[in-house]
Image (cartoon, coloured by chain):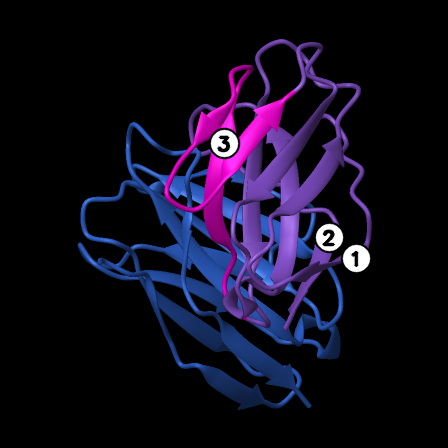
Chain colours: A blue, B purple
Amino acid sequence: EPEVTQTPSHQVTQMGQEVILRCVPISNHLYFYWYRQILGQKVEFLVSFYNNEISEKSEIFDDQFSVERPDGSNFTLKIRSTKLEDSAMYFCASSVWDRQETQYFGPGTRLLVL
Amino acid sequence: DAKTTQPPSMDCAEGRAANLPCNHSTISGNEYVYWYRQIHSQGPQYIIHGLKNNETNEMASLIITEDRKSSTLILPHATLRDTAVYYCIVGYTGTASKLTFGTGTRLQVTL
């Protein structure tokens, strides 16, 4: 069964550093998402992406965040200058054109900012 | 999006049916009910969704009341692998619809 994959599985970075989290969505999916989950808290929507542009973003997704689909397979989340409060599990998800309400999530990247 | 209310935790014996309730009294006419689950720290996993009719798939059944103000997710024969946090989410389907997760119900399946 096709899966969403994410790399790295864990990343440790220093405050102020830039990080790029990578995702490979399921190949025939057209809608892409990033969510995050701070330890012990809810899963929170960050951004959705379709047709090479952002469809919707949350208040969390400020100027420090950006997303990109640099080629036909990868979908990336960049955090320009990480803060301690960016420490969380980051999940990528994708969905197909006509079943966009059923989002397939990746295993997540655990980001720790020191 | 309408708000949902779920019990924080439930227990179920292995092999028995797990019935997970959800209240969504402010749901609007064209909002769907979705159920996802999250096993430990893995990515959420889609289970089932519905608008007003009861739905069944290989994982579960979804019973939506006639007034659509509440629903129940039924796992017919719970196994230890079904131990997870179950999220009831109400929202519109449409272009790149986001999912708004609440705190969910932590289901513990025991021997």
**Which amino acid does the dot numbered 2 rest on?**
Thr
Location of residue A90 with respect to B31 vertically, above or below? below
Q: Which quadrant of the structure image shows residue A88?
A: bottom right
Which of B20 and A25 lies nearest the eye of the viewer? B20
Q: Position of residue A75 (x, y in %)?
A: 33, 59
> Residue tagged by mark 3?
B49
The total number of labels drawn is: 3
Q: Report the magenta residues as a range.
A: B42-64
Q: Earlier in the sequence, mark 3 or mark 1?
A: 1
Mark 1 and 2 residues: CB-CB less than 8 Å, in contact? Answer: yes
**Placement of A53 over or under A80, stated as above or below:** above
- Dot 1 falls on a residue whose secondary structure is strand
Identify the chain of the residue marked 2, using the numbered disc in the image: B
In space, the residues marked 1 and 2 are separated at their CA atoms by 5 Å
Circle number at residue B9: 1
**Can residue B2 be spotted in the picture?**
yes
Element on which disc 2 rests: strand
Q: Say what amino acid the circle numbered 3 marks.
A: His
Left or right of A73: which side holds B74? right
Instruction: Give residue B38's position: percent from left, percent from top.
Output: 57, 60
